Amino acid sequence: MSLRPRPSRTLRVALAAAVLALALTACSGEESPSADPSGSASASSATPVDGGDLTFAIGNDPISLNPSGIGSGNDTLYVTRQLVDSLVWQDPADGSLKPWLATAWKANAEQTEFTFTLRDGVTFSDGTPFTAASVKANFDDTAAAGAKSSAVGNFIGYKGTTVVDDHTVTVAFESPNAAFPQATSTVALGFVADSTLAIPYDDRASGTGVIGTGPFVLDHYTKDTETVLTARDGYAWSPQDRDGAGAPHLAKVTFQVAPEASVRTGSLTSGQVQVIGGVQPTDIATLEQAGLTLVHRANPGITFGLTFNGASPFGKDPAVREAISLAVNPTEIRDTALTEGFAVAVSPLASTTPDVADESAHLVTDPAKAASVLEADGWAKGSDGIYAKAGTKLAPTLVWITNFGPNQTSVELIQSELKAVGIDAKLWSGTVPDFQAKLAAGDFDLVWGNLSRADGDVLRTQYTTQGTNFYKIDDPELEKLLQDQLAAGDPAERSSLLAQAQERLVTQHHVVPVHELTTYLGLSDKAHGIELGADSRLDQLTTAWVG
């Protein structure tokens, strides 16, 4: 029996106020600017230039430009973050919440009511004022959208929002929701104008009529080709604690869709674009050798790994879950598919997530024990070397998508590791909409994936009956822990409950954590001030300039 080795911590970002204190070292070559702890490129000594145009290559079409809609993940949020602001800003340096559109906020003792005091003078890009009524209208709209909204997990038990006066608003829930203030920092809870809310929810995906308070406005969106934004006049309400933020320096930003990572890398090295997202591990050395800047940050939230469908015949079998967990070797997967810049997971939560707990003592790779667990459960190997019981072969369906280049290598290696034990995993992959439909239908046994959010409540939104409930986990103890952490007004109590939930997830083998995701952006020497936020996604481009 061998414990999974503890990962190297040299490429992790410090979260001074969180449980772990980790250091981030530069990944760029000697001729490239390094990255600072917030995930931004080191400040240039040159004075920012106003009026430049930035071309940013992304891997996927955004799918939806409705800020609270369901898009294609990071590439969608890179775009929509530029259109909308949030009530609070989460500082990537320590995970703390800072003022943005709200200058102050407070919760009642039960964590069921949250009162926000709003900044004065904020307007939408159509000139209409942002007020407490705007907050109410947006939150009511998101709650009414239900499963169509990526923010639905934050509105469980939503009672409603009360306008106290133009600059004061109270949001109420039927049950405790201590994670709600952090949720208000996310793009999905950014604000759009009344005219946008009047458009049917599904029709907002095209971006037509989507009006926010953010520093940029939509010029045009051409599906699978590009999204072009232009700077708005009069923007003056960046987070006051975000160094250097203010009105945008850039005049125009073009998010250009380039699905092939090699094409994005080639476009950057040839000077056709100034920034690329989704830098693949295999291209990191190429960019370093070219003397280009790499902005990077380990993503908070749920690590890449396997999650079982608790309602499928295989997923509901504790012995099958344990055997698969024992058969998977995260270190082998990381070393084969990635680089040292991607840490082996020690928890269902990544190292940059507040309240992460080290569960490595419970994460064991032991193929021999996997076989014995199955045999004790009545499984027997057939002549083909695959276990079977009661006429059913142990052949779970593992679904995945290509939203991260190394995914295919990772799942194929997992398939090989399982086959060596006697488990014949069947791989399925498809488009993002097909993948989402498969999850909603429960047509899977295992899912390979991750989810970024800078709060431990991401576990509740994914793994309880009050969240998306894609995984149908039947574990009352886990359910209670994840519900109780929402009621904990004391940060230490909440941290303890989240730690117990992380332990429960791995000891009951509901999930198999494998590796963390690290976001890498590649920058030419003309791009400056590009920053990653606390969620390790592109922050607003108010600090960016080209020259």
Image (cartoon, rainbow, N blue to C red):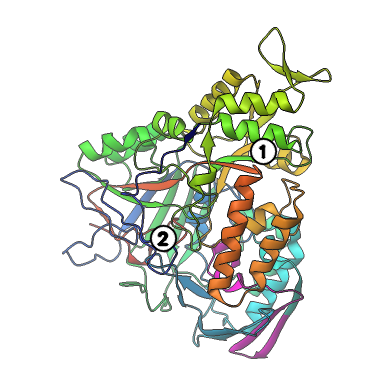
Work out whether mark 1 precedes mark 2 in sequence or the reverse, and give the earlier one. Answer: 2
> Residue 167 lies in magenta, yes or no?
yes
1 on left or right of 464: left
Residue placed furthest toward the right? 390
Q: Indicate the quadrant where residue 424 lies.
A: top right
Relative depth, front residue between 212 and 178:
178
What's the magenta region?
A: 161-190
> Residue 520 lies in magenta, yes or no?
no
Relative depth, front residue between 232 and 213:
213
Relative depth, front residue between 496 and 334:
496
User: Is any atom of residue 157 visible in this view?
Assistant: yes
What amino acid is at disc 2?
Leu
Q: Is residue 483 above or below residue 133?
A: above
Q: Secondary structure at mark 2?
A: loop
Q: Which residue is mark 2?
A: 20
Q: Which mark is residue 435?
A: 1
Task: Say which quadrant the C terminus sits in.
Answer: bottom left
Q: Position of residue 125 (x, y in %)?
A: 52, 73
What amino acid is at disc 1?
Phe
Which residue is drawn at the image coordinates 63% and 78% (left, top)? 135
Q: Secondary structure at mark 1?
A: helix
* Front tag of 1 and 2: 2
168 on left or right of 319: left
Q: Position of residue 360 (x, y in %)?
A: 49, 46
Which residue is drawn at the image coordinates 34% and 44% (left, top)? 8
Residue placed furthest toward the bottom? 165
Q: Indicate the quadrant where residue 252 lies.
A: bottom left
